[in-house]
Image: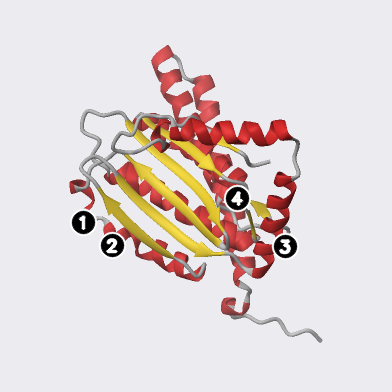
Amino acid sequence: MTVLNPDPAGLQEGVLLRELNHRVTNGVAFAINLVSAAAIRVEGAEAKCALSDVVELLHGYADVHRALATPAGETLIHAATYLRKLGCGMRRAVLNRMNIELAFATQSLALEPERCWHLGLIVHELVMHAARHACFDARAGQISIKLTRTGALVNCVILDNGSRPARDVSDRELRITRDIARALGGRIEQGFGAEFTSIVLSFPLTERERGANWTIASRQMKAPRRTRAAASNDAAYVSCRPADALGALLLLSDRTDAP
């Protein structure tokens, strides 16, 4: 006879997270269907346009939710590709509507699934934190994500061209983000200038990740000379841009060497 544990606390955390993700996904899909049907039935171009905009907004949030879902399996994840997908969802849901540009400058980086998920949670919160609290004044809002690896250390920089005043009281919102960073064995540091703010997440690679990224780096070194020259040109593209308050990052288009 099998005895079922009636205590929900007996369920594994991963099972609960997947169930929660499933319910939220279904809820968003249901909302999209309802609003889409309303957009078809309603009369008037203005009303149809407004409802269609809501559908697009919900699709953006669905993209973000899918990107932030708990990963399954043990296969290493290409973090640059993962962050790019997450960024596309954030653009669609929020940033485009706020007239904030999101740019990428990322190196190939393989991470364990749960740790890549933690990175995504942190990046999402830091980008949204900047969108909510940065004081852009009359400037067009710009946020850049730079992901690099130096040896066994990963650095992820969230850089924006907003000034500091509006964010002084908002740092407490980063408490959970700092806790997630500590779970990665890393830390978060902030820097401020007259017209820019940077937040840097640094964390070490695990032994498994070090081995995988060493293999990636070795393959890149063995790539044809033309491929390496193209990578060098991309690096030169960064360094030859004018040195404004944000540096070259904010002038980058969406570039990534992720597969």
Residue type (three-letter) at the residue carrying disc 1: Val
Using the numbered discs, state the Cα–Cα distance from disc 1 to disc 4 in whole angstroms: 31 Å
Disc 1 and disc 2 in contact, CB within 8 angstroms: yes
Quick one: SS at disc 1?
loop
Residue 7 location, x and y as percent?
Answer: 59, 80
Residue 143 appears in the picture as rendered: yes
Q: Nearer the viewer, residue 228 or 244?
A: 228
**Front: mark 4 or 3:** 4
User: Which residue carries the number 3 mark?
Assistant: 74
Q: Badge 3: how crowded within 10 Å, few (<14), some, or many (20+)?
A: few
**Front: mark 2 or 4:** 4
User: Which residue carries the number 1 mark?
Assistant: 169
Residue 240 location, x and y as percent?
Answer: 43, 30
Name which quarter of the figure residue 95 lies in.
top left
Using the numbered discs, state the Cα–Cα distance from disc 2 to disc 4 in whole angstroms: 27 Å
Q: Is residue 101 left or right of residue 161?
A: right
Residue 177 location, x and y as percent?
Answer: 41, 61
**Front: mark 1 or 4:** 4
Residue type (three-letter) at the residue carrying disc 3: Glu
Using the numbered discs, state the Cα–Cα distance from disc 4 to disc 3 in whole angstroms: 14 Å
Q: Which mark is residue 205?
A: none
- At 41% from the left and 19% from the top, the residue drawn is 47
Mark found first going from the N terminus, 2 or 4: 4
